[in-house]
Amino acid sequence: MDSRIATAARVAQIAPFHVMEVQTAARALEAAGRSVVHMEIGEPDFPTPQPVIAAAQRAIAAGDLYYTSALGIAPLREAIARHYADHYGVAVAPERIVVTAGSSAALLLVLALVVDRDDRILMADPNYPCNRHFVRVLEGEPVGIPVGPDTRYQLTAELVAANWTPGTRGALIASPSNPTGTTVPREELRRIADAVRERNGHLIVDEIYLGLTYGETPRSVLDFAADAFVISSFSKYFNMTGWRLGWLVAPERYVRDIEKLAQNLYISPASPSQRAAIACFAPETLAILEQRRLAFQARRDFLVPALRDLGFRIPVMPTGGFFVYADCSKWSSDSERFCADVLQNSGVAFTPGIDFGVHRATEHVRLAYTVEQAKLADGVERLDHYLRK
Ligand SMILES: Cc1ncc(COP(=O)(O)O)c(C=O)c1O
């Protein structure tokens, strides 16, 4: 007899992160004495900036480490609002900013706010894997719309219109995107916002990688769509993944309901992390972060041509984040097998496309430039050696 007592059916529809399996295999190789170039990891290799650590130490020493408001502490909400004004030229009232336990919690809150059972949420395929799982947990239907290089791997207003049905509640976009690093052009985003609004839907835009934009002026959707929900985080641009802190910008009329959800789901974001994060916006921290952004850009500028030269197809230059989404069909149409083979034979770890959806997922891999340039160069050399054989 099976000793397991039944669990909810929805759990069967939640897939694990394949990237974690790649990482486990990579660590096993390292434990056996092999060296590995890690290009599977979706977090910055840079440590949290020192002024932020110092602010956390001061906060912990002061001992004010109780629950906070579910919406976050006022000085942090105000600092985030000022950041929108200074960096993106958009006025956002602090009352519209909800500090969350990572942008993961922000995504969960906004989806819990808008998704009822069987409601459809449109999203690009490929996209960040948790999105479809969040919608499933809420018993909605994630609708992955196949996208390719012709639309910069992003949704368009036409795709939104063509896939909208009476049961569709909204569209979720990430710009820049994980795994493709591509942005939605500003005019297209405006057209998407119009298309969603005309259909009485909700537009959710994940701007977690907006601070890491290269060669274009980063623009928030809030610039022209005050009715959009915007997701962001301290994890990526601010190098604070483990502090579990993000935020959501919501139209003011929804903030009270979001507060209720946050109170019930996790009470409040972590208190020391919030106090530390205020230091993110100090000029000395922003100067450190700008240097690091430029370092990411230099890595991208090295890696993309080098991968193309090896035979990976990368039709659209990524302009944000720290990922390259590359077509590996020259060698394999089984990206999982390909990643495992390359790891075993060359000691370079990256992620199979199957983590991010189903559309041509077996012919793509995601490489992260979250290691220093010398290691990237080593990785490219190893790939050259193995793949050109
Ligand atoms: C597109 C995107 N959104 C959200 C997240 C969640 O990040 P966090 O919860 O650390 O803010 C990630 C993490 O990789 C991501 O890539």
Image (cartoon, rainbow, N blue to C red):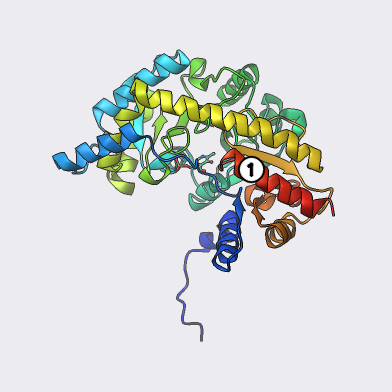
Residue neighbourhood size for the residue with mark 1, other residues' Cα within 10 Å, grouped as few (<14), some (14–19), many (≥20): many
In the rendered image, the vertical position of residue 53 relative to residue 255, given as above or below: below
Between 40 and 120, the one nearer to me in the picture: 40
> Relative to 316, is 364 above or below?
below
Three-letter amino acid code at the position of disc 1: Leu
Give the quadrant of the C terminus: bottom right
The answer to whether any part of residue 368 appears in the image is no
Secondary structure beneath dot 1 equals: helix
Say left or right for 283 vs 378: left
Residue 14 vs 82, above or below: the answer is below
Q: Which of 156/211 is in front?
A: 211
Task: Give the percent coordinates (x, y) of residue 51.
Answer: 31, 32
Q: Residue at x 57, y 66 (%)?
A: 28
Which of the pair 284/253 is nearer the observer? 284
Q: Is the CB atom of the residue marked by disc 1 within 8 angstroms of ligand 1's nearest atom?
A: no
Residue 90: x %, y % from top left? 44, 14
Q: Horizontally, is 229 left or right of 311 in the view? A: left
Residue in view at x 67 percent, y 30 percent: 301
Total residue callouts? 1
- Furthest-bottom residue in this view: 1
Name the residue nearer the viewer: 119 or 176: 176
Q: Residue at x 61, y 36 (%)?
A: 166
Question: Is residue 238 in sight in this rendering?
Answer: yes
Per the image, the residue denoted by label 1 is 376
Q: Is residue 62 above or below residue 150?
A: below
Q: Position of residue 296 (x, y in %)?
A: 56, 32
What x and y, as percent, mark residue 383?
Answer: 74, 50
Q: Quadrant of residue 102?
A: top left
